[in-house]
Image (spheres, helix red, strand yellow):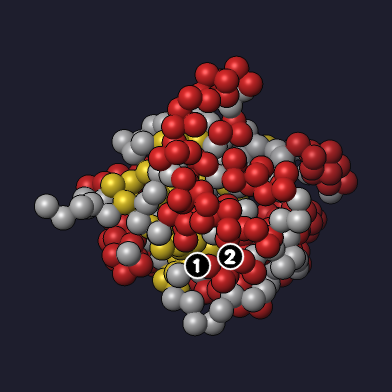
């Protein structure tokens, strides 16, 4: 009997039930006959059917003492793997202490060899660049917005070893590939584009009634990268034209920026026009979207954005910026509108233009958006693409 291919997925923490993308991906690989192992930096309840191994750095002193016999046994069992790994990282650490800290932090992977090691975020491969080679596995990574747009700027040249060791890349947008190439990715590296997707069954068409107060919504944590400061400025321009609106922001604050956004709202005199919603269930999000006239994703940096897909799936009139992969998400003037980022006046003009659209044009855009989402961003289609990705890369 042919041995199952074993795929190791490296994640920051095990997925929870609301993270349907990764949960579905893992289950789909298992259903296809792969043996899947999850390697996590952090320890959290495992909600998948795949075995989970967390970093030993998460152990308390008491837990470590209790696990010493097991760790000692696994070291003997994987002695050759550990020797090879030590040899591969020798030149990268001037300090013996740092070298052994690195080995210890990666024991949970080195103890459980796989045939394919995939990092769900490329930044997770930092400090693990030689693990795959040590266990005889192929190494691939996924590009996300934070990875190649922000993290790589904070860790200059640190991605070089990742680029030198990967045998394939999954990207969610062409924009991220262009950024990675600028930062040293080998142009010959095999790249597979698989865009984010949603379970269309969870997003029924909204039945929007126009007239009365204009309802505008954005889903996404309150962070600088989401471009809220420019949306506020645009809304202030709408207010000057006596347009009655309510702006809903769903996602909760990133604490360091709470004061800034509260100040901005006050500065633009929008205290009675903006509602900050904390993180909420899918049902509650859908309830707000069902009463939304215009959905806005005016980010200054964005890998692709599932929320914009969800808005289109519900037939919402959707405005996005031209940041990152957003122009690959929304087709300008067909399924929605792409407005140059950091330009409140252009954004305000586009909102007013949509507000004044005749009913038949609103219906046309709404239908185009739903068709676009169903044809291109169905999670079942994505699962098929991932199946091909792991088959080709295995």
What kind of element bears circle 1? loop
| Residue where numbered disc 2 is placed | 162
- The residue lying at 52 percent from left, 41 percent from top is 107
Pointer 1 residue: 166
Res 152 quadrant in image: bottom right
Q: Residue at x 64, y 69 (%)?
A: 160
Q: Is residue 222 left or right of residue 134?
A: right
Q: Position of residue 185 (x, y in %)?
A: 59, 75
Expressed as whole percent of the image width and height from the top left, the position of residue 35 reads 28, 47
**Quick one: quadrant of the C terminus?**
bottom left
Local crowd size for mark 2, using a 10 Å CA cut-off: few (<14), some (14–19), many (≥20): many
Which one is nearer the viewer's eye here, 199 or 190?
190
Q: From the viewer's perspective, is residue 98 above or below residue 47? A: below
* 72 in relation to 274, above or below: above
Give neighbour class at mark 1: few <14, some 14-19, many 20+ (Cα, 10 Å).
many
Looking at the picture, how far across and down is residue 279, in whole percent? 58, 34
| Viewer can see residue 312 | no
- Count of marks placed on residues: 2
Disc 2, disc 1: CB below 8 Å? yes
The residue positioned 84% from the left and 44% from the top of the image is: 260
Give the residue drawn at x 84%, y 38%. Answer: 259
Indicate left or right for 128 with 37 as reference: right
Residue 318, numbered label:
none
Residue 321, image x, y percentages: 63, 66
Q: CA distance from mark 2 to mark 1?
A: 6 Å
Judge by depth and name the residue closer to the eye, 2 or 37: 2
Secondary-structure class at tag 2: helix
């Amino acid at each position: 009997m042919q041995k199952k291919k074993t795929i190791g997925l490296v994640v920051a923490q095990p997925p929870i039930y609301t993270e349907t993308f990764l949960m579905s991906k893992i289950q789909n690989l298992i259903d296809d006959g792969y043996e899947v192992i999850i390697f996590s930096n952090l320890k959290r309840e495992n909600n998948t059917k795949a075995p989970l191994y967390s970093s030993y750095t998460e152990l308390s002193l008491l837990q470590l003492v209790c696990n010493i016999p097991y760790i000692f046994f696994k070291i003997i069992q994987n002695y050759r793997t550990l020797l090879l790994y030590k040899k591969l990282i020798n030149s990268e650490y001037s300090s013996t202490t740092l070298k052994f800290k690195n080995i210890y932090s990666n024991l949970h992977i080195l103890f459980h060899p796989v045939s394919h090691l995939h990092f769900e975020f490329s930044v997770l491969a930092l400090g693990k660049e030689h693990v795959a080679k040590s266990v005889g596995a192929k190494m691939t990574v996924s590009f996300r917005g934070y990875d190649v747009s922000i993290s790589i700027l904070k860790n200059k040249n640190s991605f070089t070893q990742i680029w030198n060791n990967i045998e394939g890349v999954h990207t969610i947008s062409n924009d991220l590939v262009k950024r990675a190439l600028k930062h040293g990715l080998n142009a010959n590296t095999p790249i597979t584009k698989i865009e984010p997707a949603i379970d269309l069954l969870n997003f029924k068409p909204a039945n929007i009634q126009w007239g009365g107060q204009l309802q505008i919504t954005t889903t996404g944590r309150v962070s600088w990268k989401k471009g809220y400061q420019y949306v506020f400025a645009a809304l202030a321009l709408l207010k000057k034209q006596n347009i009655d609106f309510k702006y809903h922001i769903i996602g909760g604050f990133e604490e360091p920026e709470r004061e800034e956004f509260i100040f901005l709202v006050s500065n633009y005199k929008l205290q009675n026009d903006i509602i900050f919603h904390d993180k909420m269930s899918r049902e509650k999000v859908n309830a707000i979207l069902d009463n939304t006239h215009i959905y806005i994703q005016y980010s200054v940096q964005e890998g692709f954005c599932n929320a914009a897909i969800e808005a289109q799936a519900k037939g919402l009139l959707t405005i996005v910026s031209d940041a990152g992969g957003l122009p690959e998400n929304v087709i300008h003037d067909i399924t929605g509108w792409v407005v140059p980022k950091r330009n409140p006046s252009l954004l305000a003009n586009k909102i007013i233009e949509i507000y004044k659209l005749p009913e038949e044009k609103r219906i046309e855009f709404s239908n185009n958006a739903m068709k676009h989402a169903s044809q291109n961003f169905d999670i079942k289609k994505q699962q098929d693409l991932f199946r091909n990705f792991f088959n080709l890369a295995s």
